[in-house]
Amino acid sequence: MFKIISNENDKLTIKNMQSDEKDVLFYVAKENPVDYFELPFSYDDGEFSILFSDVDIVFQENNLEKGKYGYFYKDINGFNRLDSLQVTTILDKKGKREQKSYFKPLNGIFKTFYPALEFFEYKVTIIMAVYNVEQFLADALNSLIVQSIGFENIQVLLVNDASPDNSKAIAIEYAEKYDNITYLKNNVNLGVAITRNKALPYIKGELVSFMDPDDMLSPETIENVYKFYQKHKGSTDVVSIPLEFFGDKKGQHPLNYKYEKTQLVDLYKNPSFIQLSSSSAFIAQDKFTKDKLKFPEDVIVSEDFLLLNEIIADKMTLGVVKESLYMYRKHGKSALDTIIDKKENYVPRVENLLSILHKARAKFGFIPKYYQWAVCYDLMWLLKVPKKNAKLLSSDEIAEYQFIINEILLLIDYDIINSCKHANYWIKKYYLAYKLKQSNAVSLNMGMHVSDSTILYEKRDITLNLVGAEKNEVGIRLFGNLLYPSDFERFANARLIINEKYYYFNLRLNDKLSDKTLSENYRTHFFFTVDIPLSENMLNEVILFEAFNGQDWIIPVRTFGKFLSLNPARQFSRTIIDDNYDLVLDNKKLKISNQKEKNNLKVNQFLQTVDFKLFRYYQDIISKKTKPIWLISDRINVGGDNGQALFEYVVKNHPEIDVYFVVDQFSETFNELSKIGHVVAYGSIKHHALGLAADRLISSHADDFVIKFLPNNLKAFYMLFIGKYVFLQHGIALGIDLSTWCFKNAKNFSAFILSSKREFEVNGISSLPDFDYEEKVWKLTGLPRYDLLMEKQNSKTEKEKVILFMPTWRKELVSNFNAISGQYPYSSKFKESDYYQITNDLLNSEKLIQVLKEKNYRMKFVSHPSLKHQDSDYALEEGVVSFTTEKYVDLLVQGDILITDFSSVHYDFAYLKKPVYYLDINNEQDALTHLA
C-alpha cells in the first residue's frame, strides 16, 4: 500500500508501507475518474517523489479544467486511491489567479484544487520592430524556424517601421509563406517603442519576447525557456537568457555572470542579477494583455529598461536559463552603437535613470538594491563616452546632465558604486569622493574608508608613466606622464631619489589629455621632466620615484612607455640614450649606466636566443656602417607623398647619407623606386635590421607602423634601437588640433615639419605646452612634395582637360586596420553611409556626365587610401569618370580643377594656383573631429 508521507519542499513524497515493491505508476484524475493522467516521478532510497512543477506540466499539456483532483497509483492490483498519513494543507501561490492547494481534510482523502487554466494559441510570441535590416532579417527569422520547440508553437509579429531598404519585401515574403508570421506596418518611421507597442494587441503566445531583427537565437532557446517557465509560472514574470556578441565584435555580455546555473532568482538576495534588455528576456503575456503595460513612447533610449523594471517590481524575481542563447549582432548600425553620438543619449537618459529610482522608492518605501545596481550599471557605461561628444551639448545641457548624475549617485549605496565590475576604476572612485563630499565628511584622504568594505582611493593610486630618456645640456632628462585622481591634483608633486639626493619633477598640467566625463576631470594628466646631472655618484645607482598624495610621500605605480625598451619581466633590459649612456632595468632596479660593454654583452647574449638570424643581420649592418642611415617612408603599401619626394631628393643630392625607402615589396612604388635607389620591403628582416641601425626614421605618417616597426615577438630588439623620428606630415594642419595625437610622450619626434607661418603659429609656438616639445623640434621648411610639384607643373605638356575628385576619409567608416597589409578590410556597411550616398550621387550625376562630355573633360576619382578597399562599391561611367592609381604628384599637375570636401590636398592645388571646389558632405561633426 502506497501512502503520501509528505507534501513539503515543492513535492509529494510517497512510500510503499508494506513492501519494497517499486513496480508502480502514479496518476492524477478527477473524482470517479474515466481518464487517468500519468505523473513523472523519481525514486531514491525507498521513497518516490513527484514535483509540484511536474503536476503543473501535466495539467497544462492535457488542458485539464478547473476543479478538485485526486491522486492514484497503479500496481499489479490495478488503480488505487493515493492517500496521506497527515492532515495538511499547502497553499501554493496564495492570493494569485494561479492559486493551487494540496490538502487532506480531516476524515477526508488527499486532493488538489487546481485553478482554471489559460490556453494559448502559441507558446511564445516574438515581436520584431523592422528597420533597415535587409542583410540580417532572414537570418533572424530562420533562427526561429529551426527552433527545437517546433515553429508551429511560435507566433512572429513583424512590424515594418517604414524601413527604406528591402526589409519590407523580405518580411512580406516570410509572412506569405508561414501562417504564424504576421506582417504589420507603420506609414512613417515612428521609432522602436511605438513600433513594438503596435504589435501588443495581436499577441497570442504565453510568453512574449522583443527580438531585434538583426539578431538570432540558438536552436534550443525557446524550448528551454518555455519548460522553465512552466515550472515557475506564477513565481516570475520574466525569464532571462545569456547574450553573446557576434559580427564586428565577439564575446560575452558583461552581465552573463548571472547564468552560472538555471534557477529562479530572488532579486532581494541577488540584486546584481539585473535585466536591462527586453530582447534577451521572455515576459509573461498577461503583463501586456491584462495589466496593459507597454513601452514608454516619449523616450528614444532606455525604453527596455523602463518597462522591465516596472514588470519586475511586481514579484522581484527573475528566471535565468543557462541553456539558451541570444546572439547579438554587432555591426555598427544598431541603436546601442549609434545612440552614443546623439544628444538624446545624455540628459533624457539620465532623467530616465533618476525616475527609475524615484518610482522604486515610491513603490517600496525604499530603493531596493536591485534598482540601484541596474541604474548604476547603465550610468557607468554612459560615463565612458568619448570626450568629443561633449560638443553635442550646450554648456547648460552639460551642467544639467552633470547635476542629474550627481543626484542619481547620491541615491546609490557606496558599496554598489564600488562593486560595478565593468565600470572605469577612476570614474567609480571620483563619484565615491563626490558622495563623500556631499555628506559633509571630513577632508578626503587617499586610503580612507567610505564604508566597511569600500576604500575611497588606495594610497598608491598615483601612476608614474616613464616614457623616455634623452641627453641634454644638464645631463640625462627623464620624461613622461604623472596621473593623479582629480580630487588630489592640487597636491601633485613628485621627485626622484638617487644616491640620497632629491630631484623634483617639473610638472605641466595637460587638461586635453586628462580623463573626463562630458564635463569634469576625474583623472588629471601632467607632463613631467626631471633632469639628472651626470657625475660619478649618479651613475649605476638605483633610481627611486616618490609622489605626494596629500599626506605622505608614497611610491607610485610605475609603468614604462613605448619609447623605453625596459621589461620588468626580464632580469635585464635597457634603452640606449646615446653612445655613452644607457637607461637599464637590472633586477627591476632602474639605473643610468655608463657600462656600455657590459650592457651590450648582456643584450647581445639574450637577443641571439630570441632571433639569431635577425641579430646576425643587424650585426652585419653595424659592422659595415660608414655613414648615417636614413629610413624614409609614406604609407606601408604606397609612396607618392612627402616621403618619396624627400627620398628622391636625398638620393640625387646627398651621397654622404645611406638612404632607404620602406614600402610593401608587391607595390608599384617598390618597383618604381628600385630603379633610382635602395628600397626595402616593409616587414622584412632587412627592414627590421636597418630600422634598428638607422639614425633617422622619416615619414609622412606618424602611426605605429613607422615608429614601432617590429612585431611583438621581436620587441626585445628595441634594446638596440638608436634612431630619432622625423615627421614630414602629409598635409597642412590648419584648424586641426594635433596636440592630442602627436604630443611628445606619444610620438617623441626630433623634428616636426611645418609648411607656413600660420601653421607654425597655430600648431607650433602657441601650442608648445600641449605638445610638450622644445621649440627647436618645429621646422618651418614646407612639404618636400611641393618642390616636386612646382618643378613638374613648370614642365607640364599634357593638354587633356581633367577634373580631380579627391574627398578625404572618415574614421567611423573604417575599422580593424591591418598593420601588415597597411589596409582596412572591406565593409559591407560602407554603402549605407551618407558619405557613400553623396559621393556616389556626384560621380553618377547625369547632369555632370553630360557637361563633361560636352566640354571634353575627364573626371578622375582619387579615393582616399584609407577607403581604397571600397572602390568596388562605385559604378562609374566608363570613359568619362574613372578611378586612377596614378601618383599624387602627377595627378595634381594633370588636374585643371579639384573637387574635395576638406582634404588638405586643396593646399597643394592652391599652391599651384588652380581652382578648388568644395563638396558639402553635410556632417559638421566630421569636420570637427577629422584628423586627415
Image (cartoon, helix red, strand yellow):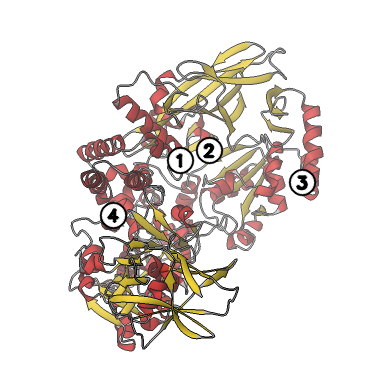
Q: Earlier in the sequence, mark 1 or mark 4?
A: 1
Which residue bears the numbered disc 1?
A: 741
Q: Earlier in the sequence, mark 4 or mark 3?
A: 3
Instruction: Please give the label number shown on residue 923.
Output: 4
Distance, label 1 to label 3, CA atoms, is 32 Å
Residue 850 can be seen in this image: no
Which residue bears the numbered disc 2?
A: 747
Distance, label 4 to label 2, CA atoms, is 30 Å
Q: Look at label 1 and name its amino acid.
A: Trp
Q: Quadrant of residue 217?
A: bottom left
Circle 1: element type: loop
Q: Look at label 3 and name its amino acid.
A: Val
Near-viewer residue (156 or 107): 107
Q: Earlier in the sequence, mark 4 or mark 2?
A: 2
- Is residue 166 depicted above or below 607 in this figure? below
Near-viewer residue (150 or 248): 150
Circle 2: element type: helix
Distance, label 1 to label 4, CA atoms, is 22 Å
Mark 3 packing: few (<14 Cα in 10 Å), some, or many (20+)?
A: some
